[in-house]
Amino acid sequence: MAQIAALLRENRYLSVELLARRMGVSPVTIRRDLGGLARQGVATRVHGGLMANDVPPDDASFASRYRQQADEKGAIARRAAAHVRDGNTVALDVGSTAVYLARELAARRVTVVTNSLRAAQTLADGRATLVVVGGYLRPGEHSLLGPEAISVIQKFRFDTFFLGAGGASPRGVTDHSVEEVEVKRAFMRCSNHTFALLDSSKLGGGIRAWSSPCWRKSRLS
């Protein structure tokens, strides 16, 4: 249970399926441990997994990240939007640069599917058709995660997926949250093309948690 509790402090929501795979034990064993953590009052059992109780209502760091490299993120968003044609179906990831791209796409005649509530809010009053996947909310990032989100994503075929990440190196793209990685992989599997939305602060940086060198390494060109 200690290992699960440590993962929960990092990821806020953990699914039974993912934990069983990660720890090499049966779902029955995981459910028993999740029940123990719930009885200790450190988490709440939810459908398919466990949610931390002490999640903050918001993460002020997002506003700070949104303002950092603002000109660079705006330029990346404009370049990304140039790869989208009217009528396309686009998958949009979470992150501050994704919100800049949402601003560019809001007035376009496209369909945008996203797990980012921040991006969705930006797109809500525009001309683009907006689809928000379901799932559990990750506070701070305001992303929707878990098996429900993946189930919705798998119903689509996307022309392009715009991926956000915590960092990138020659070994691949990295992120802080294993649950975020699962959703990104689902978007990639359902997309014809993937572009990574990475400003210069993400390149070569050390990311302290989850990495996925198997992600397709794509860049705007």
Image (cartoon, rainbow, N blue to C red):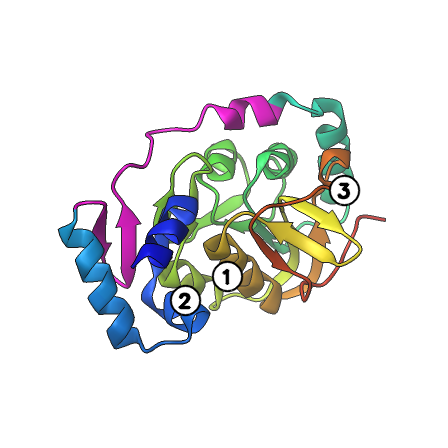
Residue assigned mark 2: 18
Q: Residue at x 33, y 52 (%)?
A: 5
Horizontal arrangement in the rendering, residue 218 relative to residue 93 (left or right): right
Q: Amino acid at mark 3?
A: Leu
Number of marks in the image? 3
Q: Does label 1 or label 2 sit earlier along the sequence?
A: 2
Q: Is residue 135 visible?
A: no
Residue assigned mark 1: 182
- Disc 1 and disc 2: Cα gap in Å? 9 Å
Q: Residue at x 71, y 25 (%)?
A: 69
Mark 3 crowdedness (10 Å alpha carbons): few <14, some 14-19, many ≥20: some
Q: Residue furthest left?
A: 39
Marks 1 & 2, CB-CB < 8 Å contact: yes
Q: Amino acid at mark 1?
A: Glu
- Disc 3 and disc 2: Cα gap in Å? 28 Å
Q: Position of residue 125 (x, y in %)?
A: 47, 32
46 part of magenta stretch: yes
Q: Is residue 175 visible?
A: yes
Mark 2 crowdedness (10 Å alpha carbons): few <14, some 14-19, many ≥20: some
Q: Which residues are magenta?
A: 41-66
Q: Residue furthest right?
A: 221
Under circle 3, the secondary element is loop
Horizontal arrangement in the rendering, residue 35 relative to residue 115 (left or right): left
Q: Amino acid at mark 2?
A: Leu
Residue assigned mark 3: 203
In the foreground, 5 or 195: 5
Q: Residue furthest front?
A: 2
